[in-house]
Amino acid sequence: MYESDYENGEQFTEETLQNALMELITEGYDSYEMCWENLRVQTYEQAGVMTYNKGLVITLPDGSEYQLTIVQSR
């Protein structure tokens, strides 16, 4: 998305990106390489991660866990 996509005054933030990625991962999947059905995806806030950053905690069916941190670079 580009800044022009937010003409109604809505600001694109780390939280906006976090929520869009969460939706993409949980609802927009289409992959033959991985079983996405049993993924657990939570925001840092939902998972209780102690940080000011926005991001996602992705837990795979085998229990392995990954964190995706969103940090604005410019």
Image (spheres, rainbow, N blue to C red):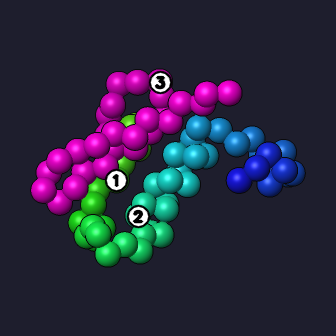
Element under disc 3 = loop
**Is residue 43 toward the left or the right of residue 21 in the image?**
left
Q: CA distance from mark 3 to mark 2?
A: 23 Å
The verdict on residue 20 being magenta is no
The numbered dot on residue 52 is 3
Q: Which quadrant of the structure image shows residue 73?
A: top right
CB under 8 Å between callouts 1 and 2?
Answer: yes
**Type of amino acid at the residue the image marks with label 3:** Tyr
What residue is disc 1 on?
Answer: 41
CB under 8 Å between callouts 1 and 3?
Answer: no
**Is residue 72 toward the left or the right of residue 32 in the image?**
right
Q: Is residue 44 visible?
A: yes
Mark closest to the chain's N terminus, 3 or 2: 2
Q: Residues within 10 Å of mark 3 (few under 14, many from 20)?
A: few
Q: Going 17% across and 47% down the picture, which residue do you hit?
A: 64
Measured as percent of width and height from the top left, residue 7 is found at 87, 51
Residue projecting furthest to the front: 33
Mark closest to the chain's N terminus, 1 or 2: 2
Element under disc 1 = strand
What residue is disc 2 on?
Answer: 26
Mark closest to the chain's N terminus, 1 or 3: 1
**Type of amino acid at the residue the image marks with label 1:** Val
Q: Going 55% across and 54% down the picture, which residue do you hit?
A: 20
Residue 14 vs 1, above or below: the answer is above
